[in-house]
Image: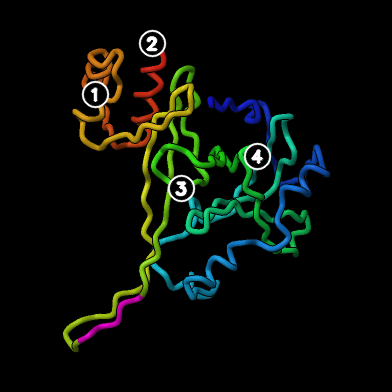
Amino acid sequence: MKIKFILFISSLTLTLSGYSQVNESAYNKMVNIAIMNEQFLEQYGISEADIKNIEGSPYYKDNFQIGGIYNAEGVVVSGIPMRYNIFADEIEMRPSSNPDDTTIKSLVKSTDIFAKIGTDNFIYILNTNSGDKSGYFSVLLDGTYFDLYKKSTVNYIKKKFAETNYQKDQPAKFIKKEVFYLVDNKGVFYELPSKRKSFISLFKQKSKELESYIKDNKLNITKESDMIKIVSYYNSIL
């Protein structure tokens, strides 16, 4: 299924001046009373205090950014602090407009709900044929024929204590991994390879033109910004 972002209105301005709840009833159904992240951390024996001492980050971006929630009807709420917790695969929100209220809640996972956090767009995909489990994907490009999605994951590596006097303790770490997908109009996912030849061969139509474009513009097929240019160009010549 081709997902079009009617929700990401280019003229929409998200500000800190106050939350603009367009559909309060719909919004209340989209927010979990208790954030699932806390339960998720308990499975790994991690407390919120522990996170500060772990190398790396469980978040797409550490700080909360102003964002909005959307459904097929349009804007549900805008101007709300949000961030994507990759490790727990949760979109966290601070729904209160009171600056003293630091309560964090999570967005209900649904294929009918979309989120824009700062300049980043997120959708929830259920049972994709991408090879990954269901979860949030960031939409890097919403093209005419092909979209470009990114799936981010974070693995937790426990602290490793030194076994001898010659070794040092290895701190606990969050290891981030990103996989990029080309998605066609039928909703079929194609993982983008890191090797140039395999990458080019994935674009069956206009492969020669695409190869010349990459070479002439000195693009790196593993660089996110260049991938966006490549897929955008591919859409333009189909």
Point out the tag, 2 or 1, that comes first from the N-terminus.
Answer: 1
- In which quadrant is the C terminus drawn? top left
Point out the tag, 4 or 3, that comes first from the N-terminus.
Answer: 4
Asked if the stretch drawn in magenta spans residue 161, the answer is yes
Q: Quadrant of residue 116?
A: top right
Cα distance, mark 4 to mark 3? Answer: 18 Å
Point out the tag, 4 or 1, that comes first from the N-terminus.
Answer: 4
Q: Secondary structure at mark 1?
A: helix
* Residue type at numbered disc 1: Ser
Give the labeled residue for mark 4.
113
Q: Position of residue 80 (x, y in %)?
A: 70, 47
- Between circles 4 and 3, the one closer to the viewer is 3
The chief SS type of the magenta part is loop
Q: Is residue 21 left or right of residue 41?
A: right
Point out the tag, 2 or 4, that comes first from the N-terminus.
Answer: 4
* Residue type at numbered disc 4: Ile
Q: Check residue 133 in the rendering and tell me which mark sits there, or answer none.
A: 3
Q: Is residue 221 left or right of residue 55?
A: left
Cα distance, mark 2 to mark 4? Answer: 30 Å
Mark 4 and 1 residues: CB-CB less than 8 Å, in contact? no
Give the labeled residue for mark 2.
238
Q: Secondary structure at mark 4?
A: loop
Cα distance, mark 3 to mark 1? Answer: 26 Å
Point out the tag, 3 or 1, that comes first from the N-terminus.
Answer: 3
Mark 3 and 1 residues: CB-CB less than 8 Å, in contact? no
The residue range painted magenta reads: 159-163
Cα distance, mark 2 to mark 3? Answer: 31 Å
Cα distance, mark 4 to mark 1? Answer: 34 Å
Asked if the stretch drawn in magenta spans residue 1, the answer is no
Give the residue at x 41% y 16%.
235
